[in-house]
């Protein structure tokens, strides 16, 4: 926590002295007849309240800001974006690809889960969590929308790397490189599937 002021904080001392002196002056016995009726406890309470309020007014005139910084340690995030469209299964070795991808994800989990927070997300349309085994059933592929959603979801977080697992066939939306051009500090890897 850090206290910042436009003026020197030594001004607090004269402000405190002036507020106490002014409160004592207002509640002295000789000044008026209305406070002659007050007992010493009530007068002391009024002096404390008045001097506190005057001190707080003077304190606000100093323009004091309290700056508080907090930090938290977050593991880097690794996003594996999978094109779960049906076009991923249009190749002669598609069953091998499914098995290889499953084995690869198990290997990634085993080797990197202690260093990274790993998210497996769909990249074909919206970034939704993928359940295993992956069902390649989407009719269309919009990698731009998927990657744009991933970018928005992890904005301001420690996104270390993005791995895109796709055949590259885009049936709708913009080109995916437009979605990731703002991720300057994130490593982006593309793993191509199929013959294109």
Image: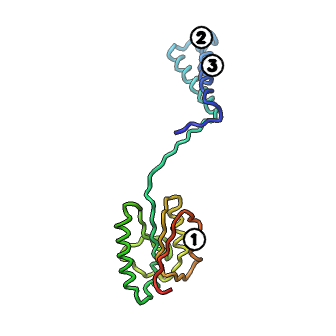
- The residue carrying pointer 3 sits among few (fewer than 14), some (14 to 19) or many (20 or more) residues within 10 Å by Cα, namely some
Of labels 1 and 3, earlier in sequence is: 3
Q: For the residues marked 1 and 3, what is the alpha-carbon distance in whole angstroms?
A: 64 Å
Residue 179: give its label: 1
Q: Nearer the viewer, mark 2 or mark 1?
A: 1
In the displayed orientation, state which residue is furthest to the bottom. Answer: 92
Of labels 2 and 1, earlier in sequence is: 2
The residue beneath circle 3 is 22
Q: Taking 126 as reference, is 182 left or right? A: right
Q: In terms of secondary structure, where does tag 3 sit?
A: helix
Image: 152 above or below 13? below
Residue depicted at 52% across the width and 42% down the height: 68
Mark 3–mark 2 contact, CB under 8 Å? no
Image: 16 above or below 114? above
Q: Nearer the viewer, mark 3 or mark 2?
A: 3
Q: For the residues marked 3 and 2, what is the alpha-carbon distance in whole angstroms?
A: 14 Å
**Which image quadrant is residue 25 in?**
top right
Q: Nearer the viewer, residue 156 or 188?
A: 188
Residue depicted at 60% across the width and 35% down the height: 64
Image: 55 above or below 83? above
Residue 48: give its label: none
Image: 36 above or below 91? above
The residue beneath circle 2 is 29
């Amino acid at each position: 926590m850090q206290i910042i002021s436009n003026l020197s904080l030594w001004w607090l001392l004269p402000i405190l002295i002036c507020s106490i002196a002014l409160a004592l002056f207002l509640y002295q016995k000789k000044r008026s007849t209305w406070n002659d009726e007050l007992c010493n406890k009530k007068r002391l309470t009024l002096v404390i309240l008045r001097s506190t309020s005057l001190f707080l007014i003077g304190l606000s005139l100093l323009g004091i800001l309290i700056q508080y910084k907090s930090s938290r340690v977050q593991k880097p995030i690794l996003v594996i974006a999978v094109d779960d469209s049906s076009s991923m299964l249009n190749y002669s070795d598609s069953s091998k690809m499914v098995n290889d991808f499953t084995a690869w994800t198990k290997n990634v989990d085993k080797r990197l889960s202690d260093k990274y927070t790993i998210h497996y997300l769909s990249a074909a349309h919206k970034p939704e969590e993928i359940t295993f085994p992956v069902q390649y059933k989407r009719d269309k592929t919009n990698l731009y929308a998927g990657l744009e959603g991933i970018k928005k979801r992890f904005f301001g977080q420690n996104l270390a790397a993005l791995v895109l697992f796709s055949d590259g066939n885009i049936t709708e939306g913009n080109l995916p490189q437009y979605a990731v051009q703002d991720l300057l500090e994130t490593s982006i890897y593309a793993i191509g599937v199929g013959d294109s």
